[in-house]
Amino acid sequence: GDSVTQMEGPVTLSEEAFLTINCTYTATGYPSLFWYVQYPGEGLQLLLKATKADDKGSNKGFEATYRKETTSFHLEKGSVQVSDSAVYFCALREGSQGNLIFGKGTKLSVKP
Amino acid sequence: EPEVTQTPSHQVTQMGQEVILRCVPISNHLYFYWYRQILGQKVEFLVSFYNNEISEKSEIFDDQFSVERPDGSNFTLKIRSTKLEDSAMYFCASKYIPTGEAFFGQGTRLTVV
């Protein structure tokens, strides 16, 4: 079945460092891809998405490009801030039913 | 900004007891979901609900689980006779349309002892 694999955490970075969180997927069709973020004490929030190959999703300085050839959707940010400390979830949605398939989540801690 | 609200934030229950997890979705949303995350594992889909009935459920969602929308605002997940392995964070989500953005609540941490 469909699945999402993302890099194990936790990831600890200094402020202004470059961030990459790897995400790869397995799907039978052409899924939409998402990154969700969970800040401490809050629910999952949509960070960005891409619905077809070569689309780039971006928001709050974060970017991810839908790479069909490598079945990947890696999350990147050029300069992280302390406020980016959170758990990041990669997810896919196959078809129109709306059910999401998530990865395990990667905890990011940014130190001042 | 509208949000999905879940109560309680943390529930501790004894094995074999019934629990009800509550969610108030965003008011004009039509599609409702429950997901769970066992500690250290993936967030897993449990069930989707539309037009007052279950539209899809996963293998996890067995006879022990049920959902309902009793009063047009709350969306509840009932777990009958809880087991230790039901301990997890349970997330509720709602959407206006299936392909729209899913809005999640902050989760209920269920601990079965």
Image (cartoon, grey):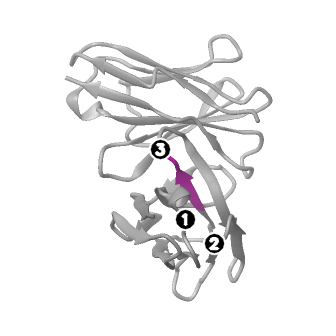
Tell me, yes or no, whether dots 2 and 3 are on the same chain: yes
| Closer to the camera in the image, B54 or A108 | A108
Report if residue B44 lies within the magenta region. no
Q: Chain of mark 2?
A: A
Question: Which residue position holds label 1?
Answer: A81
Please give the name of the residue rendered at 28% of the width and 17% of the height, measured from the top-left corner: B13
Q: CA distance from mark 3 to mark 1?
A: 15 Å
For the point 76% across and 36% down, the residue is B1
Percent x, y of residue B38: 32, 43
Disc 2 marks which residue?
A: A30
Q: Which stretch appears magenta?
A: A35-39
Which percent across, then down, holds residue A98? 64, 50
Q: Residue at x 22, y 16 (%)?
A: B14
Between B86 and A45, which is closer to the camera in this rendering? A45
Q: Mark 1 falls on what kind of element?
A: loop
Residue indicated by mark 3: A40
Q: Is residue B52 above or below residue A108?
A: above
Secondary structure beneath disc 3? Answer: loop
**Proximity of marks 1 and 2: CB atoms separated by less than 8 Å:** no
Neighbourhood count class around disc 3 (C-alpha, 10 Å): few under 14, some 14–19, many 20 upward = few
Q: Position of residue A10 (x, y in %)?
A: 33, 63
